[in-house]
Image (tube, grey):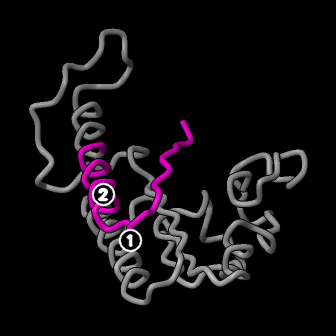
């Protein structure tokens, strides 16, 4: 909510994972859309997305996951393809665009696509996850890397990619 609104939690009021409590009527998406940009979100809008009463304003393309596990191990491929389609259309239509790609990876137990297999880096000493969890995490990150690569390849000329995470 802070990223979307530019406000800190004490000003937007959401201090936990309850995205449904957020006022999303004035966000980066609504402001860019108001000046002619095409806006899109592909992935996770927030936790408990299923609790949102309606599609928030400001999004021309709104393809959000309802659960972290939507699309199973192909999730990163599905999100990458949706993002590429959005960016391809922006280039084709010659319009400025803002795309928010928000994969849940590497959260949760989902491994990445079947193409994402080791060998992986050695698990650091002192980590608390099992070797199976480590394998899933590395596979998930492989899928995320492939998603980012595809988004980068489809950026419009002069486009900018900003990478951030919540951990």
Q: Is residue 138 left or right of residue 7?
A: left
Q: Residue at x 34, y 79 (%)?
A: 88
Disc 1/disc 2 C-alpha distance (Å) = 9 Å
Q: Which residue lies furthest to the top in this view?
A: 125
State the SS at label 2.
Answer: helix
Please say if 125 is above or below 159.
Answer: above
Q: Foreground residue, 4 or 35?
A: 35
- Residue 108 placed where, x, y %? 41, 46
Which mark is first along the chain, 2 or 1? 1
Please say if 76 is above or below 144.
Answer: below
Please say if 154 is above or below 131.
Answer: below
Q: What stretch is highlighted in magenta?
A: 141-167
Query: Are the residues flagged by discs 1 and 2 in contact, CB closer than 8 Å?
Result: yes
- Residue 50 placed where, x, y %? 60, 71
For residue 83, the mark is 1
Residue at mark 2: 147
Where is the C terminus found, in terms of image quarters? top right
Q: Residue at x 79, y 63 (%)?
A: 22
Q: In which quarter of the image is residue 69?
A: bottom left
Q: Residue at x 65, y 84 (%)?
A: 36
- Residue 136 placed where, x, y %? 26, 40
State the SS at label 1.
Answer: helix
Q: Residue furthest front?
A: 158
Q: Quadrant of residue 58?
A: bottom right
């Amino acid at each position: 909510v802070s990223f979307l609104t530019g406000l800190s939690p004490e000003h937007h009021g959401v201090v936990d994972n309850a995205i449904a409590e957020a006022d999303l009527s004035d966000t980066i998406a609504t402001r860019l859309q108001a000046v002619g940009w095409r806006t899109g979100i592909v992935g996770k809008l927030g936790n408990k997305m299923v609790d949102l009463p309606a599609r928030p304003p400001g999004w021309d393309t709104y393809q959000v996951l309802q659960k972290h596990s939507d699309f199973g191990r192909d999730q990163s491929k599905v999100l990458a393809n949706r993002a590429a389609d959005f960016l391809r259309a922006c280039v084709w239509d010659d319009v400025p665009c803002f795309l928010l790609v928000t994969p849940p990876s590497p959260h949760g137990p989902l491994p990445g696509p079947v193409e994402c297999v080791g060998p992986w880096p050695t698990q650091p000493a002192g980590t608390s996850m099992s070797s199976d969890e480590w394998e899933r995490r590395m596979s998930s990150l492989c899928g995320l890397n492939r998603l980012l690569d595809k988004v980068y390849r489809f950026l419009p000329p002069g486009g900018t990619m900003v990478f951030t995470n919540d951990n």
